[in-house]
Amino acid sequence: MTGAGASNGLVGFARALRHGGVACGPDRVQAFVAAVGCLDVARQEHVYWAGRVTLCGEPDDLPRYDAAFAAWFGGVPPAPPRARARRPSHLAALGDGAGGRSRAAVLKVAAGDVEVLRRRDIATLTPAEKRHLDELLAVLAPVPPTRRALRRTPARRGAIDPRRTFRDMLATGEAVRPRHRRRATRPRKVVLLIDVSGSMKPYADALLRFAHVVARRMPVEVCTLGTRLTRVTRQLRHRDPEQALAAAARAVPDFEGGTRLGETLKVFLDRWGQRGAARRAVVVICSDGWERGDTALLAEQAERLKRLAHKVVWVNPHAGHAGYEPVQSGIVAALPHLDRLLAGHSLDTLHALLEEVRLA
Amino acid sequence: MTPEELAAELDRVGYLPDRGIATAAFLAWRMHRPLFCEGEPGTGKTSLAVALARALDLPLIRLQCHEGIDASQALYDWDFPRQLLHLRALEAAGPVDVEQAEASLYTRRFLLARPLLRALEDAPCVLLVDEVDRADDEFEAFLLEVLGENAVTIPELGRVTAATPPLVVLTSNRTREVHDALKRRCLYHWLEHPDLAREVAILRRRLPEATERLAHQVASAVRRLRELDLLKPPGVAESLDWAEALLTLGRTELDAEAAATTLGAVLKYREDARRALSAGVPGSVTGSTIGG
């Protein structure tokens, strides 16, 4: 094989890999070709590792890489592919209910209805009203909670800032009034865990939209809970809400399935929470608390979460209904470890949630 | 040099790399690209950088990242107390020309080089940027500039460029997603826990006084612990600690009793210890497949 032929083959492999879902841009491909140049192109193992370190960017890429490598170069890749199969998604898009309606229907919702809409239960909205709610959600202006930062910034009072004081002295040539500095504040992390099981169906779409709005304003991690845990932070980073939600919907394989709160919460804490996402963060769990699994596990995990997080807030859409009592098995198990139990069934209650998060 | 030779060099200094690690490190070194290492805690990301420095006989410069880290902690800072003293000394000597005084203050003499600047000045060297996932987004952007150009501009002094790019190893425990722009400039390697044979070899290499039997017992017990559903599965560092604890107590094998008294070297959560004991992990090692 000539040099040009070899590099054509490599580029072709990269294209196949991209097709397989690994986001390897031209600069990565270039690095791949360069890497193979440093190694022995005739040895499959060398090509395998050269590609793996240059073309992959996260652990989820690795099984796809192994599959593409096996398909393109034939034979078995030198490293055994890891058992981390991804299930195909069951669902096309979240916003189907309202998506088909014409915009004219939306406009019929008069401005005066907004006040009413704010208090209405999201589950009872008509598709047109729901469209309107989406627009209202999009203009929410969440303010992140804050924590003290390590860095100091200029202030009127506080410790003396030698650097600035010294600069002043240098400029005027004599002693001046000392400048001060103090600890700045930084946004505190927020984690949203949204239950997308069957019983939460009327609320899941609005809650994900809410998460998208929040994610655009502050450092947020968003995961969906159901029979399994799916991290959708990346998908929600999309600027456009429709695209972000569609991407999130594609990523969630267990939409409208059952709930295993304890197990999924455990997965969250093992994979993300304990390592940093939940540490000293404000964690919001949006769920109705119907637990099909073992509530002892949920209680254990809620306690663990409580120890890691700054504040734990549970949002239950049913908590806003008249005569609500926290009797669902999941809520009962988790309640001793929560800082707050809030309603989350209407725009107003979501506003209240934002306020709660801001002050956390 | 080939990846195999680099592997042999790493082996010589006590780090036993698998194929992937050796090739990734080799490419990072040859292509002058930073190596971004991710993986479970305790899979040897940090020690890889330490071992590379020793294997290639280069100085190791370490930058530990944390929340709120900024340029003055990572790159350089001015030594204000000394500048102030210098200014006082100038004043005491007689009338001062302000322009000149200022110029004399911002010289290399009063510059405190922090790890990144030191790495550029001391290159060739190995630069370890540890736990980059703990730093903030702004810091990543800043790192991007330094790593991309192997140079940094100090307004008062000018540009400092590395003669040879340092071999950079970034580590991340994935507490947070690192920005794509940073990853794109790096080679990426995901480290797994070593397989049984390699872990035994690592234990034997680092603790020569441990017998093959003890190393095998510890490594297989740790493997079983990793399969349990623990809050913090033990890494290689923990197996080393465990074996060392056993040796310190004068134990030559890992029986149930020895395991129970030294379990704190491997498991750092009460829940984990309870789970391991109820699964009978340390106890089962005695009667395990190794045989007498």
Image (tube, coloured by chain):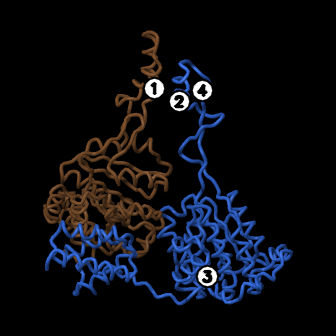
Chain colours: A blue, B brown
Question: Picture quarter containing residue A87?
Answer: bottom left
Quarter of the figure with the N terminus of chain B: bottom left
N-term-proximal mark, 2 vs 4: 2
Q: Which amino acid does label 1 sit on?
A: Pro
The amino acid sitting under disc 2 is Pro
Q: Farthest top residue?
A: B94
Rendered location of residue A324, percent (x, y)? 79, 78
**Outermost residue, right side:** A112
| Label annotation for residue A178 | 4
Local packing at callout 2 (Cα closer than 10 Å; few below 14, some 14-19, many 20+) is some
**Residue A201: x, y in percent?**
66, 85
Q: Which of marks 3 and 2 is nearer the N terminus?
A: 2
Looking at the picture, do discs 3 and 2 lie on one chain? Answer: yes
Residue depth check, mark 3 versus mark 4: number of the one nearer the observer: 4
Residue A238 in sight here: yes
Identified by mark 4, the residue type is Pro
